[in-house]
Image (tube, rainbow, N blue to C red):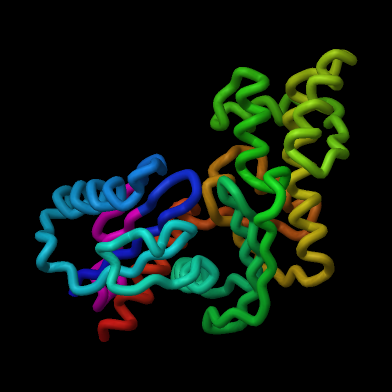
Amino acid sequence: MICVGVDAGSRTIKVVVLESHGLRVLGSGVADQGVEQNAIARRLLQAVLDECGILQQDVRAIVATGYGRKLITEADASITEISCQAAGVSHCLPQARTVIDIGGQDSKLLHLAAGGSITDFSMNDRCAAGTGRFLEVVAARMGVRLAGLGDMVSRSSQPAVISSMCVVFAESEIIGLLAQGATPEDIIAGVQASIAARVAAMAGRRVAPPVVFTGGVALVPGMSVALGTALGEPVAVAPDPQLTCALGAAILAARKSS
């Protein structure tokens, strides 16, 4: 039985195609978000199905998640990203007890019990300073790609202190730091530490290991180390961290159809 998860996030749309009996991933894809997100999701799904050699009529169930889940008309059901993220992470890493998910526009902290059930969660979707958007703004200001941030952080000798709690003010603060002679490497390291500190503040003292990092920001080199330093716990990046939510949606689609 073929089931599909669609994660319509704020920056990208992700699709995972699953063979439900063995929960085996047959294919996946990622596309940039846009105005016509339902059309983007439809094209992405068709491309992944074609790559897998699967016909649309062979798909038993589709579950949508993410900010745009209500707009995915192909979906049979929509489920929150909290539930889908928990299902995806617990499938890949059953021992996980804390999940940090940082995407383009928000950050989330999930606490899991044995078996993957959610015991508590918190979410920041009001300020971009603790999200991937902050990194995008800074990378653009520095004229570097996100993939190159890790190399820059490794060359930092004295990470800058970014105190502003708003991405707009933080950008102004960064301009001021550059004018004062701070290096781009130290500023990038400071930005990563600032994001990690915001997540740690959201977590408080409720971080139980093992800690797993998901979302698009988990792909940015250096962020898992910054989080580990802020939390005082090792932070492991999930396999295909950008896809865990879509994977969880596909798994929940399989459960609903069984």
Residue 205 or residue 138, whichever sits in front: 138
Give me the residue at 27% from left, 61% from top.
Answer: 17
Residue 169 or residue 32, whichever sits in front: 169
Residue 195 or residue 33, whichever sits in front: 33
Q: In this image, 253 relative to 82: left or right?
A: left
Image position of 141 with respect to 212: above or below: above
Image position of 156 with respect to 29: above or below: above
Q: Which residues are magenta?
A: 15-29
Indicate whether residue 26 is drawn in magenta: yes
What x and y, as percent, mark residue 157?
83, 26
Q: Is residue 69 visible?
A: yes
Q: Is residue 93 visible?
A: no
Give me the residue at 26% from left, 82% from top.
Answer: 257
Q: Residue furthest bottom?
A: 258
Image position of 177 with respect to 47: above or below: above
Dominant SS type (magenta): strand
